[in-house]
Amino acid sequence: MLLNNVLCRTAALRLSSKGKLICQTDFTAAPRKQHLLPHNHRYLAKAFSSLNSSMVKQGPRPLVICGPSGSGKSTLLKKLFKEFPDTFGFSVSHTTRKPRPGEENGIHYHFVSVEEMQAAIENGEFIETAVFSGNMYGTSKKAVENVQHQGKVCVLDIEIEGVKQIRNSERLNPLLVFVNPPSIEELERRLRGRKTETEESLQKRLNTARIEIEYGTTAGNFDVVVQNNNLKQAYEDLRNFIVRELESQQGQGINVSLNRVCDE
Ligand SMILES: Nc1ncnc2c1ncn2[C@@H]1O[C@H](COP(=O)(O)OP(=O)(O)OP(=O)(O)O)[C@@H](O)[C@H]1O
Ligand SMILES: Nc1nc2c(ncn2[C@@H]2O[C@H](COP(=O)(O)O)[C@@H](O)[C@H]2O)c(=O)[nH]1
């Protein structure tokens, strides 16, 4: 009886405060204890549990952020993760490039050898892979699942060949954002200013950038193009697009947190 009260009261609270069912743990408790419930409550628990399982299956859409090296993807993502600390989880890619100062294995990337990467590819561990500026990169199934199991929006920071491989994936159904720099000249200034690349790597990245900009700014290839001339404006544009999208997903019954941390 106590169990019934707790179950139904929690459900009612969730219904009245938000107008929809969003609580995962409360409702998943229902099926296992159904034999303890009177008939009408059993019906309620069944309805809640089936709603819940479809919501869990249909988590928030992953967010793919793409753009030439140096266009500002990491800078924008850092601001997004800071403002919405509960909302997003980063898909940690594999790469064969060497770590930069400050980059940590398992946090920024899984840094692996070419042999390890090839073995993992042959083992079918990746959703997509690409060679960029002479190094291999890839998003593993596990990297995405780790984030999705937490109910968070999985963020993939990947280049264009990877985007082409996953853009039509029905299972991922990703939102595609392209970050566009003001010009190649400004991109070069920003990349040089970052002081992470050798001259050779820098030239490779700039050469690829021209192709990426062409593809990224072609209508229909991305859901939104964020023009990163001014960081404050670019972040506002990115944030507004994402919040609008996530609110629309919430309206369809998808459980995703949009708790904000204010800067001031
Ligand atoms: N709007 C901006 N104005 C001036 N500098 C910027 C702007 N946006 C980003 N930067 C600077 O440009 C450099 C490159 O940005 P960032 O590292 O975020 O690019 P990225 O797209 O993540 O690159 P990569 O793909 O190589 O990881 C950084 O030093 C960053 O501080
Ligand atoms: N296709 C993929 N591209 C990836 C992945 N992880 C990162 N990237 C992209 O590579 C370049 C270079 O990154 P950097 O860290 O060496 O500067 C950049 O455009 C990233 O978006 C991945 O798993 N797959």
Image (spheres, rainbow, N blue to C red):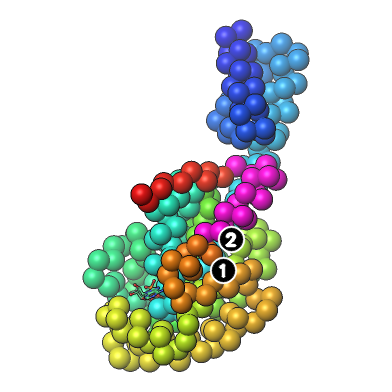
Q: Position of residue 145 (x, y in %)?
A: 52, 53
Judging from the image, what secondary structure is the residue with disc 1 in?
strand
Identity of the amino acid at label 1? Val
Res. 121 in view: no
Q: Quadrant of the N terminus?
A: top right
Total residue callouts: 2
Would you place residue 201 above or below residue 115 in this image?
Answer: below
Helix, strand or loop at disc 2? helix
Q: Quadrant of residue 99?
A: bottom left
Residue sitting at x 67%, y 68% = 168
Residue at screen point 58% across, 73% down: 225
Tell me which numbered mark, 1 or 2, is placed earlier along the sequence: 1
Q: Which mark is residue 160?
A: none
Main SS, magenta region, reads helix
Q: Position of residue 134 (x, y in %)?
A: 40, 85
What are the residue bounds of the magenta stretch? 239-255
Q: Is residue 238 above or below residue 245?
A: below
Q: From mark 1 to mark 2, how far is it between C-alphas? A: 9 Å
Disc 1 and disc 2 in contact, CB within 8 angstroms: yes
Q: Is mark 2 within 8 Å of ligand 1?
A: no
Quadrant hosting residue 172:
bottom right
Tell me what residue is drawn at x 30 percent, y 78 percent: 194
Q: Amino acid at mark 2?
A: Phe
Q: Is mark 1 within 8 Å of ligand 2?
A: no
* Residue to which mark 2 is pinned: 241
> Mark 1 — residue?
177
